[in-house]
Image: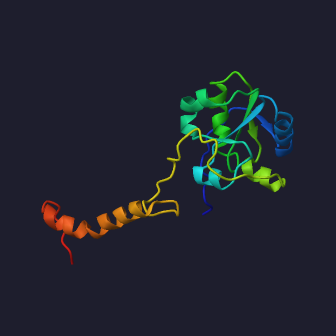
Amino acid sequence: EAPRALPVAAVTPQQRIGPQQLKSWLDADRSAQGTVVIDLALSARYVAGHIPGAWFALRSEIAAVAHRFPAATRFVLTCGSALLAQFAVADLQALVSQPVFLLEGGNAAWAQAGLPLESGEQHLLSPRIDRYRRPYEGTDNAATAMQAYLDWEFGLVEQLGRDGTHGFFVI
């Protein structure tokens, strides 16, 4: 039996632009309030590589962070493939008076066009809470935080032994 396609929510019609159009807008707007790119990708992907000057926001927080958007004549939404961003166009358009565009193909199309990406945590409108990070993950964690986690984990068996109400036993 052939696999069934999963239903996909309908999106409202939106104005779409390609990477070259976005690049020309960004080049023309360097000295003025112009195009602002909002990247809705996972925060880890945003940090690894995004369109230069793009701002990171979680889609679920667009309404909460909209007042922090820089002044703009237009907004362009993007993410890795534009799949998520297309669902946010109507949300953002309801919050701002400027036109809102979708970057067709998202950051992948931008990169495939040979356009530059930048990396780093600049322009974070939302905190990086979209992915749980274990205490020992990453190289930027302080040694004290990693040691605190290891102390807790190694002490867990002893803590359970003192508790007495849990019903677990060590084999």
Image coloring type: rainbow
Q: Position of residue 12 (x, y in %)?
A: 68, 32
Furthest toward the left, the residue is 164
**Quadrant of the frame with the C terminus:** bottom left
Q: Is residue 114 left or right of residue 83?
A: right
Viewed as shown, does residue 63 lie left or right of 149?
Answer: right
Which image quarter is the N terminus in? bottom right
Question: Total marks drawn?
Answer: 0
Horizontally, residue 76 falls left or right of residue 171, namely: right
State whether residue 156 is above or below residue 71.
below
Q: Which percent across, then down, holds residue 155?
A: 25, 68
Q: Residue furthest top?
A: 97
Residue at (79, 52) in percent of width and height: 116
Question: Quick one: which residue is furthest to the bottom in this view?
Answer: 171
> In which quarter of the view is residue 72 placed?
top right
Q: Position of residue 109 (x, y in %)?
A: 78, 51
Residue 16 falls in which quadrant of the image? top right
At a point 23% along the width and 69% down the height, the residue shown is 157
Q: Residue at x 74, y 26 (%)?
A: 99
Residue 142 placed where, x, y %?
Answer: 45, 60
For residue 98, which quarter of the picture?
A: top right
Q: Is residue 69 left or right of residue 170?
A: right
